[in-house]
Amino acid sequence: MEGISVEPLPAGFELPEETGTTFYENAHLKAMAVRDQYLAQSGSAPWIMADDSGIEVDALGGAPGIYSSRYAGEDATDRDNVAKLLAELAGKTDRAARFVCELVCFSPEGAELSFAGKFEGTIAEEPHGEFGFGYDPVFIPEGYTLTVSQIPADEKNRISHRARAARGLLVRLGGGEA
């Protein structure tokens, strides 16, 4: 959409602890915290957008869910999280999963918009590929035989849960198609 630029969190701004129980709640907490910091500094805020995302696995009752980045512990690496996920899925035939992204936006006037994007697929038996991060080496999107880590970045960025949520935002703002 013409005239839109996305900027990172300004230096000195801090994100709150993720204490929500859903992706939406965590994204909302982050967006509100940034909006509040802008308002405290200057009395106004630009458009604010924050997200929370993770992976849900059916056979694990939706886990790791909102705990995806710290599934194997607070200081866990991506490799640690993937290893725990694969260990918990050992012997299970239902490997259906999805990446979920929830975007929450606030307009300068304070109006809230939220958008969810889901990226359906299955969990591989073992990691494959060199690209991506997190659970990408074990996630095989619907309609693919490769993991996300084996798919070129430009294609992943076009089909991912974040891309789907962002397209929802653009449609809602009148600047794109779903």
Image (cartoon, rainbow, N blue to C red):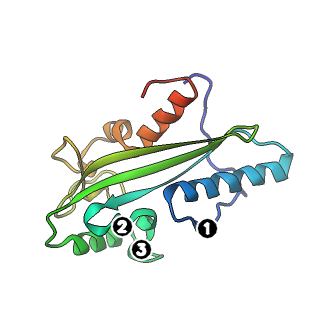
Name the residue beneath numbered marker 2: 63
Q: Does dot 1 land on a helix, a strand or a loop? A: loop
Give how far apart the Cα atoms at labels 3 and 2 are. Answer: 16 Å
Asked if 56 appears above or below 173 in the picture, the reply is below
Q: Are marks 3 and 2 in contact (CB under 8 Å)?
A: no
From where the camera sits, is residue 82 visible?
no
Per the model, the C-alpha gap separating discs 2 and 1 is 19 Å
Q: Position of residue 94 (x, y in %)?
A: 18, 62
- Residue position for label 1: 17
Give the residue at x 61% y 67%.
Answer: 17
- In this view, the mark in front (3 or 2): 2
Q: Is residue 14 visible?
A: yes
* Quadrant occupied by the N terminus: top right
Task: Note whether 32 is above or below 88 in the view shown.
Answer: above
Q: Residues within 10 Å of mark 2 (few under 14, many from 20)?
A: some
Q: Amino acid at mark 2?
A: Ala
Q: Is residue 106 left or right of residue 119?
A: right
Q: Amino acid at mark 3?
A: Ala
